[in-house]
Image (cartoon, helix red, strand yellow):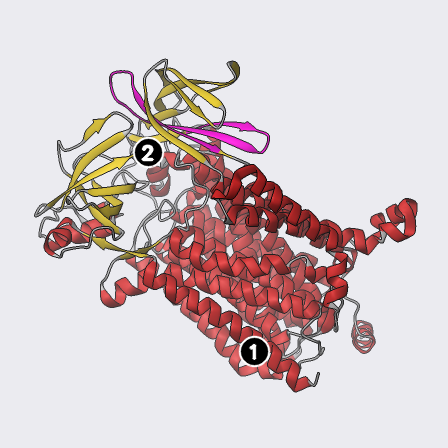
Amino acid sequence: MIVELGHFTLVLAFVLTLVQSTVPLWGALSRDDRLMAVAPPVSVMTFLLVLVAFLVLTVAYISSDFSVLNVIENSHSAKPLIYKISGVWGNHEGSMLLWVLILVFFAALVGLFGGNLPTDLRAVTLAVQGWVSAGFILFLLATSNPFTRVTNPPLEGADLNPILQDIGLAIHPPLLYIGYVGFSITFSFAIAALILGRLDAAWARWVRPWTLLAWCFLTLGIAMGSYWAYYELGWGGWWFWDPVENASFMPWLAGTALLHSAIVMEKREALKVWTVLLAIFTFSLSLLGTFLVRSGVLTSVHAFATDPARGVFILGLLCFFIGGSLSLFAWRASMLKQGGLFAPISREGGLVLNNLFLTAACAAVFVGTLYPLVLDAVAGEKISVGAPFFNLTFGPLMVPLLIAVPFGPVLSWKRGDLLAATQRLYAALALALAMVLFTFWLWGMEKILAPLGVGLAVWVMAGAVAEIVTRVKFLSVGPKRGFDRLVGLPRSAWGTAVAHFGLGVTVLGIVTASAFQEERIETMRPGDTVNLSGYEVTFDGAAPRRGPNYTEEVGHFTIRTGGVVISELDPSKRVYTARQMPTTEAGIYTTGFSQLYLSMGESRGDGAVDVRIYFKPLITLIWIGCVVMAFGGALSMADRRLRIGAPKPAARRKAAVAAAAE
Amino acid sequence: MTRKQRRLTLIGSAGAVLAVALALILFALNDQIVFFQSPTDITEKAVPTGQRIRLGGLVEEGSVVRSDNAEVSFRVTDMANVVSVTYKGILPDLFREGQGVVTEGIIRPDGVFVADSVLAKHDENYIPKEVAEALKDQGHWQGEESAAN
């Protein structure tokens, strides 16, 4: 009965989203306040209904209700509780339900906290969000119903794919989806602006916190996914340029560009048309990502099941929303007045440069991701585009961008002085050059690019610090007043510096972990020792062990430096009983920011195992940098001017007072 | 600077960046992509040695030989032709005799395929799409559609 309740509330939510998509829009066009006022409560109600549906599915999972097809296919009564819960979104139907839940959640947030938005903007934004919600709830109901029952319930389920039985699954998809789907609200704002034909600096101020929110979560989600793949798949890689990874990376690149162009729009009323276009692009790329991952055109851990009907349905939604929004853009964009002139060398100019390189890099990733699919469909030729392609295209495009990052915040608006900006960055430049020389001295000339990469990363980090120092004028006002100024700095300034610093940290991790990694592959017998990067790794033997829903062969390794035991690692080979599927659990020893990574191959029978050992210097910086970036974004979001909301122009405030008095 | 000059600078720099991006993409597409080949393709078309390719098919039953130093050799078949493969490293969890596999690497002059990566996928009933189609080409595909999930 309870399962039918979930199905029923989902149908009800669909009907409500139809109301949400039409009535407020009609109200905004006919200037009827009562019709517009329908939007907020309906959006909250839709969210509650979808939440009930989601909870119902969760209950079905927790109680192992094997009369539900979705639970049979993806759960098992012996599975630990945490994986029963995270298993709800570890499959196609459940993950789409989570997708929709977050979609309507954002609409509800605008409904609840959008009180300081102009009434018509809020109504139309919620209406657009309603179209997207209606489309995806219909998709769920028509092709991917998670509440389908079976007539003869089996006693036991088929269990969740073992790779997904990890704490990573509990965290990665929700974070990623909040990011991915969060851009829908920016999209809705952009479409609403096009429909209303009104786009001012206040619009950018409303849109920026939503973009920041989505961006922070997407950053964390991608980082989490990368770390998860790193320790769970046992290959020791943290990024594979897999189409599925690219699917989440493209919205991130476009969203990062959007974040920066929205600043120009807010402060200087320039780049309006471009910002709206970026908002459309960013969510379109999210939709494209959903299509790539969910339609089954790609085979990967994310493609849970292939069903042509689903692919066609999402493709239809994709065409409707992307095509529709771009047509609307072509029709209405000329109405948006341009303002705010600026010289090429200025903060605006810097932000334009940022946008240029980010979109160009995004385009490169786009081509690399879709070219094999298109070529297969058109010419029937099978190719693979892997890391070499992306390193050659994405890499060179990032270098000038990273060089430019520290300049942006120290240039002044409208007309900047490159020489004066450089003077402020002398210390950062000196530090970066010193690091380049130091790395050369440490590693010699065998790796030419790596020291330059290290220098680039230090340049970005030191530049972020230099920005704060020059803003506070520590050197000229003395430490006491300098400290006061430090505290009084707006949080958005801190946010920029922290996020840029985090970017530098991530780049440093990427450069050192890729260039200075050491790797050994050996067949080891009990008692064998392998030396790597100053660590002595001894294999002591392997023994079987039983887990709740798997059996495993655990290897025992002792790590020593100079004969002293510093750690013991137990990597293992698991076989999950229900699916008879093997997985590899890596053993990881973290020292400072570096990691020793050990993964075991299949046992050879005579006690010998194949072992792969990596030493990855500073690799954790890759993910720490992402967390720092997200923290910077959160700081920026907490800035006072975004919290308080945009001041209303006097004329409209009077009109609002008059309207309230009626 | 006049308004027009400013606009031209902007458009000029945008054009330059996009041109560089386009050049990089075209160059990389020309150079860095890897074609998928079945054992029959390799036997019939002389694939130049030293060129990176992807080889896919089924791991022939009884062909897997492990030697020390974590080296392993096996044969990949599409039921019509066979190619020998050597690989140093840890085989993926789902690598099995008789199952689908995709390997990437180069052909040595003696005809042996030296793989530097071996891919098996994340699911137990997965057959790589390319492999499934290569097998269909050879008329040896018996699995139901659902096996390609």
Viewed as shown, does residue A644 lie left or right of A588?
Answer: right
Magenta region, residue range: A586-615
Viewed as shown, does residue B142 lie left or right of A418?
Answer: left
- What secondary structure is marked by label 1? helix
Q: Nearer the viewer, residue A483 or A476?
A: A476
CB-based contact (under 8 Å), mark 1 and mark 2? no
> What is the chain letter for disc 2?
A
Task: Say which residue appears at 10% left-offset and 48% top-offset.
Answer: B140
User: Mark 1 and mark 2: span between their CA atoms?
Assistant: 61 Å
| Residue position marked by numbered label 2 in the rendering | A157
| Residue position marked by numbered label 1 in the rendering | B12
> What is the chain letter for disc 1?
B
Task: Say which residue appears at 46% left-offset and 50% top-offset.
Answer: A97
In this rendering, the label closer to the viewer, 1 or 2:
1
The disc labelled 1 sits on which kind of residue?
Gly
Task: Say which residue appears at 26% left-offset and 62% top-offset.
Answer: A376
- What secondary structure is marked by label 2? loop
Give residue A528's position: percent from left, percent from top: 36, 16
